[in-house]
Image (tube, rainbow, N blue to C red):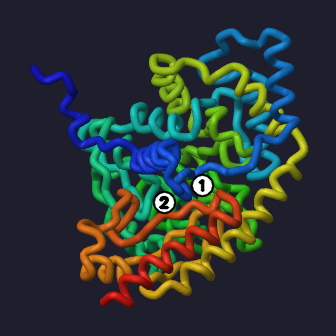
């Protein structure tokens, strides 16, 4: 008899986690590997946040909390949304989860039915479509290549919408491309979505604070406030505060949907780790200047890696406007490698069309320079040999 449910037959393991695991394995074997796959800052968690966690442990805050998060953390999240985003939420409209990944999973399980469609702008974060499929829905992709800055247009969105459309993700700044939608671009998408009231909008703002082009962050609710009643605003502490391993994500949204998402969570993980919640509360209410040195470092790394990639024959990379990823178009270089018999299959991380690579520059400048030099040398040797 089969032991695996049919719905999992179309689900793939997370390719980014697989790449990171392989890099770690090769390093353990003594190989000289420069790992640039992980989507996490290489900085330590700020000390005042760690101190808050230690204090929580010493005070005995190590028991179960409410499934959807502690009242004090929810209050901190409400304050953050009001202070930084101009959004008003009540406690019942807030959910704390075990990272941003669980937020999206809870949303899919609470919202989507058999036959529903979830719109996924591509390139995309790897888990969006698989989460939709686990909820028995169909992912519908809208592809936006380097020629349009990896951002979909209102015309593309309109063509993708059907009577079955139920959810759309908007991720800006983007993982994997580093692209950032402007206020005008979001307004254009909002004008389309306004005509389709059955679609719930998930704005994934996880990289909100990592803006590299000097712009001010805005999401679709900021420019189209009338969409607020059917938008879930998703965020977390992982990227801005270098707290990936603490596993705290959060969201604000319509009470009925948030309560359904909490119900899903109550039967899966229950509450996020109590200690991590107190650390996250400190992060959101403490001195926000701790973010500035990280962003400054990412800006310089983005410049160096973009310039380096664009010097490689057959590689073209846009300068990322946010997050900490370069997403170079390597199609010409890959064709060269194919012709020389150096690779047998296209590069595909399930993020977009074959031929693009996500490269995380959340690593040291030394590693970035070495990695670019190695890529250039490998492609250059093939061209010389050819």
Q: Is residue 366 left or right of residue 316?
A: right
Quarter of the image with the C terminus is bottom left
* The residue positioned farthest toward the front in the image shown: 30
Question: Between 192 and 160, which is closer to the camera in this rendering?
Answer: 160
Provide residue 305's location: percent of width, then percent of height: 62, 74
Provide residue 277's location: percent of width, then percent of height: 72, 26
Residue 4 position (above or below residue 44) = above
Which residue is under mark 2?
Answer: 194
Is residue 161 visible in the rendered structure shown here? yes
User: Label 1: few (<14), some or many (≥20) within 10 Å?
Assistant: few
The CA distance from mark 1 to mark 2 is 8 Å
Marks 1 and 2 in Cβ contact (< 8 Å): yes
* The residue positioned farthest toward the left in the image shown: 1
Q: Residue at x 65, y 11 (%)?
A: 64
Please report whichever mark, 1 or 2, sits nearer to the chain's N-terminal start.
2
Q: Give the secondary structure at mark 2.
A: loop
Residue 232 position (above or below residue 49) = below
Quarter of the image with the N terminus is top left
Q: Is residue 83 left or right of residue 62?
A: right
Provide residue 128's location: percent of width, then percent of height: 41, 48
């Amino acid at each position: 008899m089969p032991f695996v449910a049919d719905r999992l037959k179309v689900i793939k393991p997370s390719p980014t986690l697989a790449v990171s695991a392989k890099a770690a394995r090769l390093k353990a074997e003594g190989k000289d590997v420069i790992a640039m796959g992980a989507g996490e800052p290489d900085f330590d968690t700020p000390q005042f946040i760690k101190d808050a966690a230690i204090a929580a442990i010493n005070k005995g805050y190590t028991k179960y909390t409410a499934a959807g998060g502690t009242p004090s953390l929810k209050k901190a999240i409400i304050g953050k949304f009001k202070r930084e985003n101009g959004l008003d939420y009540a406690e019942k409209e807030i959910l704390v989860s075990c990272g941003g990944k669980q937020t999206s999973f809870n949303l899919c399980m609470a919202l989507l039915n058999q036959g529903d469609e979830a719109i996924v702008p591509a390139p995309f974060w790897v888990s969006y479509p698989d989460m939709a499929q686990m909820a028995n829905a169909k992912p519908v992709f809208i592809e936006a290549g380097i020629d349009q800055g990896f951002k979909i247009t209102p015309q593309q969105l309109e063509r993708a919408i059907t009577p079955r459309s139920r959810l759309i993700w908007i991720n800006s700044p983007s993982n994997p491309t580093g692209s950032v939608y402007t206020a005008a671009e979001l307004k254009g998408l909002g004008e389309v979505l306004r005509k389709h009231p059955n679609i719930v909008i998930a704005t994934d703002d996880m990289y909100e604070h990592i803006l590299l082009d000097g712009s001010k962050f805005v999401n679709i609710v900021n420019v189209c406030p009338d969409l607020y009643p059917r938008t879930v605003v998703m965020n977390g502490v992982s990227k801005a505060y270098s707290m990936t391993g603490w596993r705290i994500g959060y969201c604000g949204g319509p009470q009925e949907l948030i309560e359904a998402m909490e119900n899903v969570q109550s039967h899966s993980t229950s509450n996020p780790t109590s200690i991590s919640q107190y650390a996250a509360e400190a992060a959101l209410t403490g001195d926000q200047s701790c973010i500035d040195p990280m962003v400054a470092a990412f800006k310089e790394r983005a410049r160096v890696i973009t310039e380096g990639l664009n010097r490689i024959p057959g590689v073209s990379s846009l300068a990322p406007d946010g997050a900490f990823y370069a997403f170079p178009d390597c199609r010409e270089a890959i064709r060269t490698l194919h012709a020389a018999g150096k690779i047998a299959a296209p590069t595909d991380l399930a993020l977009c069309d074959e031929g693009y690579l996500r490269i995380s520059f959340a690593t040291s400048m030394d590693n970035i320079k070495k990695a670019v030099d190695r890529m250039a040398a490998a492609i250059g040797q093939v061209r010389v040999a050819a």
